[in-house]
Image: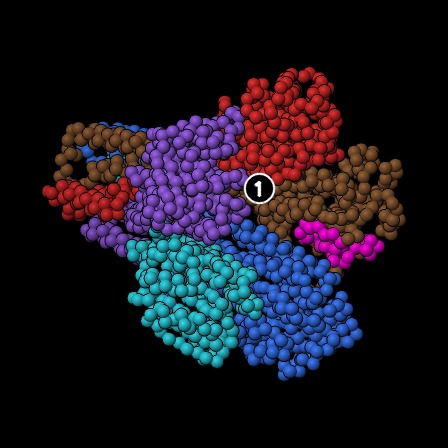
Chain colours: A purple, B cyan, C blue, D brown, E red
């Protein structure tokens, strides 16, 4: 239990280097990757090149060519690599600071020569059923995209595949379309998570009706926490993408507009699904509480029925257990059977009463 | 029970093909129709033609005539038919993707040559009392409307009837008026569903007051879920129709404006009714919970009255059941009747006490 | 009980003719008047004429004169009369449809030649304490006002009186001022209803503190329902009047502006009072629930005190009621009084304990 | 109790004269002053005159001088005095109607020649701890301010003092600054009330933790009601003052702007404090309810412990109280002590059980 | 306990000097510093001077030089010092009043020659775990910044250090950058507090699941109160900084824009974290309440099981404790063992029943 809580609340941990001058590169967040890994993909309609690079300097020749260059950097803890990339690409120190500070809020900034986008990618830790967040930053220049991830992931693999095989529009289009494709992959991935959440809600709803336990309550609250987390990641995403759509920048071609609007629609759909889930989860809490209430009610009824039947009977038995010398009934020949008959008729009366009250 | 839940939650199922290039046609959703059925209606003020078509190619000659052409396609699972329609009509691949992806959020898009509208049509499964959603897409061009439905339905039948018999304005007006008529039919249909929901609320309110059971609670929550579902379908509808109203497109004539405003008013009315229902349903939850509370209170009172009366009496009986050698009362001639009299007066006192407390 | 609920929920009944071409006149709603009654008042600063008219045709000569003409039509079920009025006055079929469809949402529409206003008039059924809604439509033309009501009412009587006696500004001003006066009368009437509601809240608050019963809860929920109903009627009224105020139409003179702002202020006041009442009513629900809780608590305390005192005593009596042969205490001369003393001291201890717990 | 409720709800009483032509002067509200009292203060940087006036006509000569004239009228029930003031100052009849109708919502209206401001002044009835509202209207003309109060108050006394002694800016500035000073005094007075409310909350919070009673609940609800009342008075105040600030009127000098912004800031502060108080009060309700819940829990535990310990013991005593002829234990020499020992060990076991459950 | 409450509520105390002319300098708030302390730092890219000053007059020569001058004043109770600073720097009396009135709401005002910013700095009283607020005011002129604090603090120390050692951009930039740095330090400090709050939430969540006590409830409510307080401080901060960003003032250079946007992002992040915490805390209240409910349920079950088992048994024992002369069973040789056997089988039946009900 404790473990889960620790992990959950870590999602919201605030980490901040206080007292350093602005623009100082300090990696904030967990170190999620073993080492920094740089993969460069360089393509246009005819050519294609893909290379893993050891020395960061090796990727700049690609970038300076007129072809589209996608530099993907996994692992943010080696800040000097990030620093070099920034220096060579003319990225503002504050932007670099945002890249390595993984508690960033999703946002978009147009800096004229390039557009900076930071957002949250969500994944599911299969072992523990935990929803994990990871920060992804994109720098979109005239003919290049630099993407920064906290760890290696397979979300961008289908895109690489499409570039390699020249499937779809991607090889024919520019860097802005590539950036869109990356955004699209990230947003699509939310649907996978939501499907998982949806299934958990479904199975929880079933349990709720058949046999709710305090554990059920715990799971409802875990779901609630996950929803808070997802919301926090997705809401600003909407602003980011609508910002990108409205941006009047030469870096984004007109023809990419319809694609951006498509991602925007998906984001809205993600948000609405989350809101719907929130409604459903809070409805589940209501069901849980009223089922607990109902159960209590039932327990009380059993107690009351038992007590109401037997307490008077026991009293009668007590009467004839008294040791007074002069108790005429005790001497009667039919005393005992009459007493039993009286008791039985009390039980019968009670029974009628409970029936009327609809307790039986 | 399980069945219901499965069905309910399916309404919100998120289905998404992840990793495919944008614009790939994949049917997402249940296959609700046996086979795709295409009906073409072609008319102007004087002429009228209606034909069911086997081969999709047969409907383009109609479309290219200056008369108004309405191509209605039921069934979305044969994506190549949709693809052909799209290719011949110059519909953007992303739009086609939206048409066959039935988890779309209602929206409107103006693409210059045509306007694309997607919305949710609601129907009631009579057997199970389930509210079902179905996606309807409209493509409105200069002199044609293409409508896509997931399955055959009878909602558009009165419109066909009106076209056949040249009743109302429809034969005199253009494609935009036809599109309006379709929207109007869809929105009007919401009222039918709302009337059903209203009746369920009414009958539930009665049960609630007379004899609420845990089943009542279940029905309240089902109603709540239905409301969430309806809301999710209708809220964006409002934006769609107000968007259509404000659109500055040559495809929509000025004279159609007042009709669109009329549908818009109906949509607002649907939304407000849903909000009112929501308020009423959440009020019902309150009534239910407080009636459970009241019932518990009553049970407790019965228990307390019984216990409070008999426990002291039993104690007195217990006293004179003790076997001490020297208990003077036991020897008294009037011991027994006096003891009974004491007991009776205790009962009388209790009775007065309960009366004062208003428990009896 | 059942009756009340039926009536309440009827307020929200949705009635809709599905499948008819738009603009078809169908009266939707209860038939509240015996027969349609038409009263024409025609006046200017010097002249005044008032006449009840049998044949609708008779009122058009008045309308075509330069004097101000007020045609008041009570009863909407004879749709052909409404149709004739519409045809002669050039009212759009959709507007006529709205007039006879009494589930309309309050709205305003500027159609150039005339302004159409539809709103809800609230009245109180004295016998049953029911709040009833009625639809009132106004058509304001250059020199005429046509008002449509569902049934005869006395709300406009003071206005007629003022016109007859040339009291106030009304005879000097135009048709727009007359329309304002009608609106003002309708809005003022809300205050009467609110005063009634306020008194019910007051008396309920008193009951709530002195002796709440389940009936009290019922009345709270009835109040809540009434509030939902009032809100639904008044909120759009605000938009209507502010719309009228902002309208740039030649039909409304500048000098009428300050009067419209005055009605607007009243509407805001009505809305705020309703919101305040809502707050108070939901506060009452809280009080009710916590008073039920408190009561339960008290019942539990009585039970616990009785049980806690007598159960141990009964146990002691039980001990000395055992029939063991060798029980030395039974033989003691002072056994009985000592046992009684022990019991008394237990009672005393309990008493001290309860005092400390503040249960007594 | 009843008295309090009556008074509280009176705050929200709606009073409206229905059926009179607009602009008719009817005093609505309690008559709070014995008789109307008119005080005129006339000043510029050098001169100063203050006079109580019997006949309203005597104050117009002051008003027509170029010096700043402040006419303060206490008591609104003598409507003919108000009427005369209005007629001589050219105040619109509807404005006069608002002045004497004391259920007005705070608002501002720019009528060109003068600005009309109506707001609520709050005071504390020391005897009963009641928060009372009073309507104050201001008419700001080029060189005069007319203020209308329901009764004499001492809130404006410090301002009079400042004018008399030429302290601060007031004697150097114009009528707009005087109006600002009056507004400032009214808003400042809210802080006094809020301080009182704050103290009540503080003392209530203490009681809540130490010994909550149903009376505490009552006080929480009274606080809640007061908050609703304050809110209703202050929220529109904000619009009034920001409206005044944004007003482009020649009646308000540029240099007064910063002062108005200052009052505006204070109003925001009042509003935020009220909102904070609302949050705190609703938090208190939660605490109260859970403390009641906790208390109930405790009562239940005591009952359960007593019953769980003694019911089995009493049963054992009952066993050996049976009169069967052949009960070997009864004959045993050690029967009685063994029975007692068994009972003791049951008590010990119970004790261990309760310890584990953390009930003791 | 009492102490805490007093302190908490003091945070919201409203203090207001009523009746004084606007612009009168009165220190409102606690006196938190022993004596006023003035430190002047004067620098440009090459030079640097830092001096603690006794006489306020000594700092003006610095201010009048073209270098950047930062005058930091700790302690606001000596209003004549503040007054002198104001007079020499041409600060408006109302602004000075705001500086010494420490219950100010965060705001920004552009007065042309200088910009005035007032905000709340949050710190943590280590001893008591109390969150304390302090008012900080900044006056930003062309080449100077005057900062006013209620007491000495170490939050600005790293900035001083950076100026001394010419680290970062600060020595190269102007007064606007210095003001930004101060704002940044204040906002960064919120993160420290939030981290502390986050840890408290985490540890509370653990307690909540393992063993909730009424003390837990108390801590939840304390957290809630802290959240209300933080919210009240931070929300207006957002407007302040976005106001500063949008300000079109010559005092703020274009190049400072990106830095301001950065602080703005941080503020948003602080706000969102607070909102997330609020959600979590209110979720904790739900968990607490339902765990209390569950516990109650469990207690009731134990009581019911014990009572349900033993009450019937005791009754049977009571039967055979009756003293009727003719009770055949008493004479039977196997009467006693049979009676015991009957009792045992009742226990067995009960056991089966409870198993079915899932109470055991």
Decide if residue B200 is in sight here.
no
Q: Is residue D307 left or right of residue D228?
A: left
How many callouts does the rendering have?
Answer: 1
Tell me the residue at 72%/76% (across/down): C42
Q: Which residue is mark 1?
A: D275
Q: Is residue C162 left or right of residue E340?
A: right
State the quadrant of the C terminus of chain A.
Answer: bottom left
Under circle 1, the secondary element is: helix
Tell me the residue at 67%/35% (across/down): E250
Tell me the residue at 53%/76% (across/down): C25
Label 1, residues with CA under 10 Å away: few <14, some 14-19, many ≥20: some
Foreground residue, A94 or B217? A94
For residue D253, above or below residue B263: above
Foreground residue, C273 or D267? D267
Foreground residue, E37 or A67? A67
Quarter of the view holding residue B335: top left
Foreground residue, C44 or A57? A57
**Residue D28 point in image, percent of width and height:** 71, 55
Which stretch appears magenta? D84-111
Tell me the residue at 69%/38% (across/down): D262
Q: Is residue D88 magenta?
A: yes
Q: Chain of mark 1?
A: D
**Residue A127 point in image, percent of width and height:** 29, 38
**Residue B33 point in image, percent of width and height:** 32, 65
């Amino acid at each position: 239990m404790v473990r889960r809580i620790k992990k959950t609340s870590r999602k919201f941990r605030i980490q901040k280097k206080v007292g350093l001058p602005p623009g100082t590169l300090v990696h904030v967040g967990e170190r999620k990757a073993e080492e920094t890994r740089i993969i460069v993909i360089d393509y246009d309609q005819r050519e294609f090149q893909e290379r893993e690079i050891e020395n960061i300097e090796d990727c700049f020749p690609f970038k300076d060519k007129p072809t589209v260059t996608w530099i993907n950097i996994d692992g943010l803890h080696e800040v000097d690599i990030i620093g070099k990339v920034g220096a060579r690409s003319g990225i503002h120190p504050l932007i670099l600071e945002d890249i390595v500070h993984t508690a960033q809020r999703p946002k978009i900034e147009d800096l004229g020569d390039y557009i900076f986008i930071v957002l949250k990618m969500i994944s599911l830790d299969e072992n523990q059923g935990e929803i994990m967040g990871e920060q992804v930053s994109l720098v979109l220049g005239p003919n290049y995209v630099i993407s920064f991830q906290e760890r290696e992931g397979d979300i961008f693999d289908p895109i690489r595949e499409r570039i390699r095989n020249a499937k779809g529009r991607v090889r024919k289009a520019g860097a802005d379309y590539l950036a869109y494709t990356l955004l699209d992959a990230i947003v699509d991935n939310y649907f996978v998570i939501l499907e998982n959440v949806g299934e958990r809600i479904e199975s929880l709803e079933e349990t709720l009706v058949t046999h709710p336990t305090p554990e059920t309550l715990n799971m409802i609250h875990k779901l609630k926490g996950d929803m808070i987390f997802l919301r926090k990641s997705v809401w600003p995403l909407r602003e980011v993408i609508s910002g990108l759509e409205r941006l009047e920048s030469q870096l984004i071609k007109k023809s990419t507009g319809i694609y951006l609007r498509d991602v925007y629609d998906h984001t809205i759909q993600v948000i609405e699904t989350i809101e719907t889930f929130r409604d459903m989860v809070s409805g589940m809490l209501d069901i849980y509480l009223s089922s607990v209430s109902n159960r209590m009610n039932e327990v009380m009824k059993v107690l009351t029925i038992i007590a109401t039947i037997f307490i008077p009977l026991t009293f009668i038995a007590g009467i004839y257990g008294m040791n007074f010398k002069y108790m005429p009934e005790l001497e009667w020949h039919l005393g005992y059977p009459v007493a039993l008959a009286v008791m039985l008729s009390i039980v019968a009366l009670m029974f009628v009463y409970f029936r009327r009250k609809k307790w039986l």
